[in-house]
Amino acid sequence: MLPYAPWLCWLIPLGFAVLIPLADKIHPRVRDGLAILGSFLAMVFAASMIPDVFAGKVTIWPDGKVVGEIPYGQSVSWINATVYVNGNETRITLGAGVLVDPLSVFMANIVGIIGFLIMVYSLGYMAGEPDMRRYWFWMSTFIGSMILLVMADNLIQMFVGWELVGLCSWQLIAFWFKATTPSPVPDFKTEGEYNAHCGMKAWIMTRAGDICLLIAIAAIGWAQLKAGQPLTFKFMDLQESTGWLRVLADVGLLVPISVLMFGGPVGKSAQFPLHEWLPEAMAGPTTVSALIHAATMVKAGVYLVARMVQVFYLAGESAGMLVALKPLFITVAWIGCFTAFLAATQAMVSMELKKVLAYSTISQIGYMMLGLGAGALLLIPAHGYVAGTFHLMSHAVFKALLFLCAGSVLHATETKYMYEMGGLKEDMPITYWTMVIGAASLAAVPGLAGFFSKELILEILWKEGQLALFTLATVTAALTAFYSFRMIGLTFHGPKSEYIKKREEEGKHVHEAPPVMWVPLVILAVASIVLGWLGPYYEAFATSGRFWVAHELGSEVTLEKYAHYLTEVFATPTAALSLLMLVIGIVPAYYIYIKRKIDPAELVSKNVVLRALYTFLYNRWYINPFYYKVFLNGTQAFSQRFRKLQTGILNVNVILMLIGFVAFIAYLVFYLL
Amino acid sequence: MVPVAFAILVFIVGYFAEETRARKVVDWLATLGMFCTLAIAIKILYKVVFGGFVLQFTYPIATLSMLGTGLKVDALSAFMAVIFSSIGFAASLYSVRYMEHDTGLTQYYVLLLLLVASLNGVAYAADLFTLFVFYEMMGISSYSLVAFRKHQWEPVEAAMKYLFMAAIGSTAVLLAMSMLYGLTGTLNFEGIANALKNAEAPTGYLYLVIALLIGGFGVKAAIVPMHSWLIDAHPAAPTSISAMLSGVVIKGGVYALVRTLFMFFPVTVYHWDWMLAVIGVVTMTVANIIALVQEDIKRLLAYSSIYNIGLIMLGVSIGHVSVLGLTGAMFHVLNHAIMKALAFLCAGCFLHVVGTRMLSDLKGVARRMPITGTCFGISLLALMGVPPLNGFWSKFWIILAVFLLPDPVYGGILGMLALINVLLATGYYAKVLRIVWMDPESEKVKEAKEAPPEMLIALIILTLAILVIGVYPQPFFEISEKAAESVIGVLG
Amino acid sequence: MAIDLFSWYIGTVVVLYSIGLYCLASKRNLVKMVIAIEILLAAANLNFIVMSYFMRTGYVHTLAHAIVIISMAIGACVAAIALSLVMNAYRHYKTLDTRKMSRLRW
């Protein structure tokens, strides 16, 4: 790696973010250049760590000095605190550190590379927008803090990055708060207000998850103290020591605490029951949706699950307590699987292009969680880990691609509703074809990235006979295929909508995006074709290092092994089944939305069951209204009533105070007795 | 000697200020006085923490020498004095422009200096009587300052409520003092502590004393249900005074509570820990629930002060089991003073420029005043507990300490309640941020311009403090740790 | 006999304090509330003297005297500020009724 690469890859974007407002004073071009340069350097530094992971040892690049093996950690002291428990002194040392291992390098590179591509795309997409200073500032901060999150070697430092990316997400979702166009939702006057609301919703919902995460972190600390271990939050120390796990199991808190630990990822990765913020997050600019709400930030949860499943699994294995951890892995798998299904059903009826993509993101992250949970459940975590993170990578690529394509379409048509598009195929050929590749990858058409990775997840479920999970996951695959092609059909096929025709009469023809926008599209499209075929290499990468027993392929990939791998992938019954599901999904989508043979509106209005189903799905299973009613309006109404207690009359204040005094005395007298 | 010296300095400055009639002279002189106070306080802190230096002052008068030492400085009091003086400095720097349209500025600065002097006196006091005298002096100057704009109805009403409630608290403290005096024959902290240590089983009187002390000091510290003065007094006072009240005056109450409870009543005998923990949680919850629907920006910040007091109380309540809790609480006292003072001062800038405190009229104001808006945003994010800012660390340590308690049920339930409150608080802070930054501009802010530079200097100093403590908390955390240890006496 | 006297004194303190608190909680008139505060203060001060008496019967320590005198001075300051506030309040509200003075609430 380059010298200090694990530090510089996040320090540089963060530092550049601070410089951006200053650079703006010089010239807007300097500012743009600085932002792009920051993300470029982050990418270079992150990429420079890849060879080390393959080699299994860390070599500093120019002088070729070997400084350590993978996993390689560096840490400096940050905060020291003393805890006294029952007279025993324990020192907590919180270090600021980095951990170079396959998982962190892999995530850092996804963030670095996709981040850089999207920054370049932003040059075109956001050209001429006001407030670009703010945009670049938050984007750079985001890239920096996201890499900080994945490179951190302890839970606390990771939490710092975790909160920071949430903050960036809030600010970027609400980026267009000045928009004065009418709001898409009747509750708000302007679109700007709606955007600001969406950002806040994302922030508060993800923070609800973060609180669960903090509880779990603190509880792990408690267990360590109880076990008489030195207090540490480092991943490596946690997975090597077992005392804390035993203590948690002894008091019966192991499963609750570990499930709470996954509350954080549930919030950040928009899994059920905290998934409701992600569809609204689409109010932000498309670049933001692509980077934060598809490719990277929502994967932070998957990253943490991968990390913690590893920690729990390895610690549990050496403590001989894997059976006790089973409910945890089942919970993760079921949450993932159910979310995948839930979101896929909602995506089938969504009207907005970006919301379809948002639902599909939720659904695909569900698959990743399923892979991670199921893998650990079946006591072959390496499989699940490889499958989950592989799907993470391919999803990051094809979903970023889909979002950027959607961005081009939105840029050209200036509407987000799919029924206001249609027939754009001829006008935007590059966007069309790249988007078809993305959608096919999402639908898991064989030969594309999404197919290979999803196949791995299904295969695990099949092999170990988790039939309920397997059935749900396979049905979801059919739904995925259906909504992917519905999206393509509605957007690009069929006759042009009234809205587009009207625009054309006004002389605003739909046009292909400028090169600065379509070049990243092509790169990502090529990547989503190639990536799937690199599966064995990915497995070699992910299993290097000493966390996991090497997968059967080992770290050397030969041609023979490669052929074997492919036949294994294609020859399993799951492959046939998922092909069947693909057909079941695509055929109706083809007839209804691409050929426009059947009118969906007519179909729904004729059939009572379908209509009820449609309403149910369109209202998002009534989960969202329920949350609003209970958590927003309920609290507000309660507060409104509660504040009446503050009468402002001096006598009443004095009486309340006296009640306080009496209560204090009563309490102490109670103790005396 | 040094505390007395600077108390005298403050008086001299005050006196001098009264003599001079040139307006700006008074302002800058007062600010200079504050700066000297701050410098001396920092020097004392440095000496006490790193030099192991104990400063004592004995009354020269024969009668009062019965009290033993009058003033004594240990790490905790030096630490608190630095907080008090620094916020005082920021407030007085800010007042130079903020109060320029008011009359009677001489009285204002004298009172402000007196307030800081008496706060420092409270921190340095070594016996209950000295503490009481300074405590009352602090009360008197703050009542007057709240009612400073007496030609308006609001400050008068607020000061009225403040005065009556605080006076009841003071008499409760006095009653408790007299009982302690009767039981031990002295009012000196160490004397009382020694006498109580030798006493046998706790008597009913002592429980009454604890209740009266918690209640009495709790009025100033604004614990629920003694909080109702705060939400009226803080918004009504001039903003610099709101910053003082929220930032430090309520901490005076907390300090007195910590000092007396920890010194006199070992918790293993007197079991006030549960009570303080319940008070803390109730305080947080009540404040947060009401704060969710506030329409007035300063009133909302006042409720959030009560919430933070609850958090500090929670940290204090577990101080006997783990130093970490008290350390976190002390660290939060420091951080909250900075954050809340900054938030109030920024709100004051909005008020100064726009002329209203209602959130509905302040929509989009931060866009018109970007520097103030940025400082306000940072202070609210810090209050929300976003990591690389200082508020996160102190909240984190308090909550971690609560969870680390040996009893998982007790610690777990308290910690979860505290975290739920953190979430509730996120709701209203985020709402305020959305309103001032993102909502479409209201009619009143259309003409708004950036605040004058003298005010911005105070804001920027505090903002930098938030960032520095947030990114590298270690030195500040260490000092809070020393302060907490000095009162618990683990290392002493 | 001395013990009897002591309990009488303590009883007086308790009664005085209770009267003050009752007055604060129930009276609407601000001037009456100021008087109530003074009663509370008197009770506390009296307690000092009583406690001193308790320590050594028939003799009040000078410290207690000093403290009581200083605390009375402080009480006078508070009362002065309270009365000036009452006056100002009367100017704004044209009444001394605390229940009318509840414009700041919620």
Image (cartoon, rainbow, N blue to C red):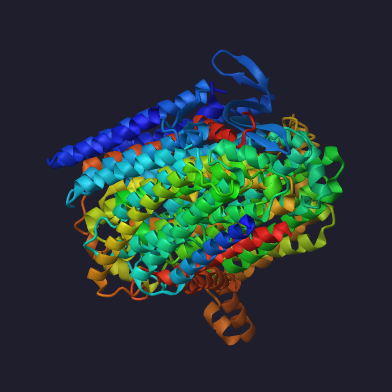
Q: Is residue A467 left or right of residue A581?
A: right
Say if residue A126 shows up in the picture. no
Give the percent coordinates (x, y) of residue A319: 85, 39
Residue at (74, 31) in percent of width and height: A557
Check the picture and name the quadrant holding the C terminus of chain A.
bottom right
- The correct choice, above or below, for B345 with respect to A350 in the image is above
Q: Is residue B80 above or below residue B176?
A: above
Q: Say above or below: A127 vs A183.
A: above
How many numbered tags mark residues here?
A: 0
Residue at the spot 38% in from the left edge and 60% down from the top edge: B162
Looking at the image, is A525 positioned above or below residue A154?
Answer: below
Position of residue A260 measured from the top left corner of the image (x, y, whole percent): 68, 53
In terms of depth relative to the viewer, which is nearer, A305 or A463?
A305
* Percent position of residue A625, x then y: 54, 73
Q: Residue furthest front?
A: C1
Return the residue nearer the eye: B272 or A358.
B272
Residue A670 can be seen, yes or no: yes
- Residue at position x 30%, y 54% from top? B144
Considering the image in quadrants, where does the N terminus of chain A appear?
top right
Residue A218 or B352: which is nearer the viewer? B352
Classify residue A229 as left or right of residue B462. Answer: right
